[in-house]
Image (spheres, rainbow, N blue to C red):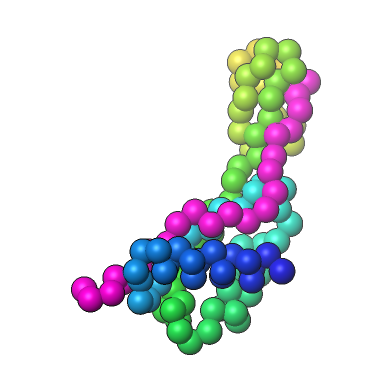
Amino acid sequence: MAIQKLLEQIEQQAKNCNYTKVTEVRLRLGCWESIETRDLAEAFDRLKGNGLLENARLIVDKNKTQAKCRLCGNIFEVVYLKNRCKKCGSNYMEFIGDRGVRLEGIDGIEKGT
Ligand SMILES: [Zn+2]
C-alpha cells in the first residue's frame, strides 16, 4: 500500500533530521491520482500510530492539470475541459498529468531542543 511506503519514508527522513516528533507532513498528489485528499488524510490518521507521528499535521497539495497546445506548444493550466490555448486560441491540445503521491517534506522537533 502506498501510504505504508510513505510512512516508511517519513520515518526515515525524521531519523535523518534527528526529529523526536514530526509536526508536519507535506504530500503532493499527482493530478490524475484518483485518491481524494480526505481519504488520504483518513488513512494517514489510521496508520500514524502513537509515536513519532502522533501530532503530525498532514498537508496535501494536488497538482493542477495542464495541457500543451499542439499548434503553438504553449503549456497552460486547465481549469475546465473546454479551455482554449491562451496564446493562440486553439483547442487542439494534449493533456499533461501525473499520478502518485510524493512526500514533499516534513517538519519536526529536533532531539535536545
Ligand atoms: Zn496555442
Quadrant the C terminus occupies: bottom left
Q: Nearer the viewer, residue 112 or 68?
A: 112
- Dividing the picture into quadrants, the one containing residue 17 is bottom left
Q: Position of residue 35 (x, y in %)?
A: 70, 61
The residue depicted at 61 percent of the width and 63 percent of the height is 37
Viewed as shown, does residue 97 lie left or right of 103? right
Q: Is residue 16 above or below residue 113?
A: above
Q: Nearer the viewer, residue 75 or 15?
A: 15
Quadrant the N terminus occupies: bottom right
Q: Is residue 58 inside the magenta stretch?
A: no
Q: Which residues are magenta?
A: 91-113
Spot the residue most to the left: 113
Asked whether residue 80 is in view, the answer is no
Q: Is residue 107 inside the magenta stretch?
A: yes
Q: Is residue 13 above or below residue 47?
A: above
Q: Position of residue 54 (x, y in %)?
A: 45, 81
- Dividing the picture into quadrants, the one containing residue 94 is top right
The residue depicted at 40 percent of the width and 63 percent of the height is 16
Q: Position of residue 48 (x, y in %)?
A: 54, 79
The residue depicted at 45 percent of the width and 84 percent of the height is 51
Spot the residue most to the bottom: 50
The residue depicted at 58 percent of the width and 74 percent of the height is 44
Q: Is residue 28 above or below residue 111?
A: above
Viewed as shown, does residue 111 lie left or right of 26? left
